[in-house]
Amino acid sequence: MSTNIFDPRDSQCKSPYGAVPCGTKITVTLRPSRAEGFGACSLLWYAEFADRREEIPLAYAGTDGDRDLFTTVCQAASQPELVWYRFRLQRRSGEIVWLGKNGMGAEKDVIPWQQTVYDGSAPTPDWFGRGPAYQIFPDRFRRTAVPDPAGMLGDRLVHQDWDEGMEYLPDEKGEIRNRDFFGGNLAGVEEKLDYLQSLGTKTIYFCPIFESDSNHRYNTGDYEKIDPMLGSAGDFRRLCEKAHKLGMRVMLDGVFNHTGSNSKYFNADGSYPGLGAAQSKDSPYYPWYTFLDWPGAYEAWWGVRTLPAVNESRPSYVDYIIQGEDSIIRRWLRAGADAWRLDVADELPDAFIAQIRAAMAEEKPDSFLLGEVWEDGSNKIAYDQRRRYLLGRETHGLMNYPFRVAALAYLQGGDAQSFMEAMETIRENYPPPAFYSGMNMLGTHDTPRVLTMLGVKPEDVPAGRTARAAYRMSPQERERGLRLLRVGAVLLYAFPGAPTVYYGDEAGMEGFEDPFNRGTYPWGREDQELQRHFALLGRLRNSRASLQSGELQWLHAAGPVLAFARTEGDEVTVAVLNAGTEAAKVSIPWPEHLATDALSGQQFVAVQGGLQVQVPGMDSMLLC
């Protein structure tokens, strides 16, 4: 019933749409049926951060057909804010009812709507989100030679054969240490820059590249040093220079919530010559950590002893990572990086993130800050704190895991309506710059391979890790997965936000959870048809302004069929997707005489401003 009275996505009820900059005037109108007999209405407005409640009467504004109109104009706060609002309506009989997003009811039962108010004074760099991004797990992408681990941090095993399986079982202490390396390096990435360019890549996103004793390198040993198995600072600078000449930018992974226990800062194993926090209370790094009983008991990320947590409020740590003239954030931007991705952003204080953004803006004004957040980042609560990632002073954008969750649910047999609703919620809650610069993906280093997710039914997933390590998709599973992945790729590249490919997904790599999703890139054994599909989508994304920054309009969302348009000026691109097994007919509004499917070359003639297209099962079209 609430949508009959008030729909915040309808300009007749609320304008402007969605999140607004500070100070914006917002027009709110209720449209109840005259038969309801309402004589007075008011807006109940709660600003969470300011802890301020306000009741705003709505003025009677006449009728529209059989509906009464009650309206008001309210002004958004002058500071970033998260507002929750609902309505109180009084019938002429005196009865009071409450209206929220779940309909009418008692005051305690109605759910409020959300209004995001953000600081729009500092613009978001618009380069991230326009073109495709490519995520590289450095140890597994490309090596130029088999490395010799002698003298390197930690006890490293190097696989001589690039194609053999990785270690995945616990050691004699019951720990999985991730100490086996394949030797992917920066020179290997440099060698394949032309390949990345052929995919349309505009941003190369690296998982951590700093010195570490693990193959994933999320337990940093030295933020100032590229891991020697990957190369040197000079190699990194050269890679960035060449990438820039090819029109690509570079994003680094910043792991600033914790270090490795085997790091120069903690130095539990004594691998570094200086005094670490675990060796002496006189260490300059001792204040960075919280010891419960020095040196053996300390706070660690999720209790993992190899990942001692740092206290991000310590001035010396803030100076080292952010504020100092040669801070980690600044020095690697000067070395050629264009962006930072913040690992486990939920674990970082708001003030710490805000300082990173300010330092980046000062050091390189066009640099981009991305946060790892797995939920709706506009209203996320982490450690009992409502977070402010997207209110204009912290991250520019977030990893869009809600996109991945909704997309996979749709591709695996869910209703297109559910996907639309999930994404419309994000679009409504996020500031437009953040929505258009989200990192959209179907898989990452933290999730199973998308091909496996789409091809293997949940009931067929083996129970044990050894069985999952050995599992290879059947021809039938692989064919199903490939067909759905091609549909998913069209969705990924046509939707607002940066379409991000996890290395090897475009080549048909498969695998379950970590570490099985981190195999070596299959050079010479790629699925070339799938590769060509991704390359075509990359070219279309980079050549069509409508796909880069165009407005989003939903055209059809029912059952397995989804269609939406992206519009920029006079240019329109329409994605039509069918995740079902049966062919489906879809009606599409089309202003021109002809439409061409950019994927197949097939042409369609519009009749009276519309197209009738038939999409085969597990297939898609991109109409231009």
Image (cartoon, rainbow, N blue to C red):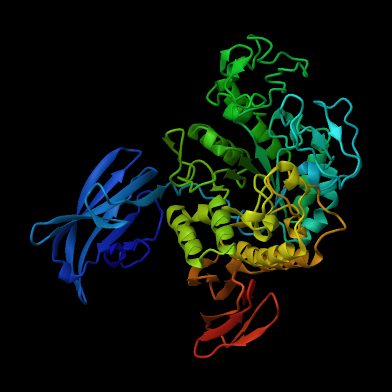
Residue 517 lies left or right of residue 111; in this view the side is right
Looking at the picture, tell me which residue is in the foreground, 153 or 173.
Answer: 173
Q: The N terminus lies in which quarter of the figure?
A: bottom left
Left or right of 600: which side holds 36? left
| Looking at the image, residue 553 lies above or below residue 201 | below
Q: Position of residue 366 (x, y in %)?
A: 61, 47
Q: Position of residue 342 (x, y in %)?
A: 60, 39
Figure check: 612 above or below 568: below
In this rendering, does residue 69 appear at all? yes
Can you say which quadrant of the picture contains the C terminus? bottom right
Q: Nearer the viewer, residue 593 or 564?
A: 564
Residue 393 in the figure: left or right of residue 196? left
98 relative to 327, above or below: below
Q: Residue at x 74, y 59 (%)?
A: 506
Q: Nearer the viewer, residue 170 or 257?
A: 170
Residue 237 seen:
no
The spot of residue 328 in percent (x, y) is 67, 31
Determine the residue positioned at 36% across, 51% down: 114
Q: Which quadrant of the structure image shows residue 499?
A: bottom right
Residue 131 point in image, percent of width and height: 65, 59
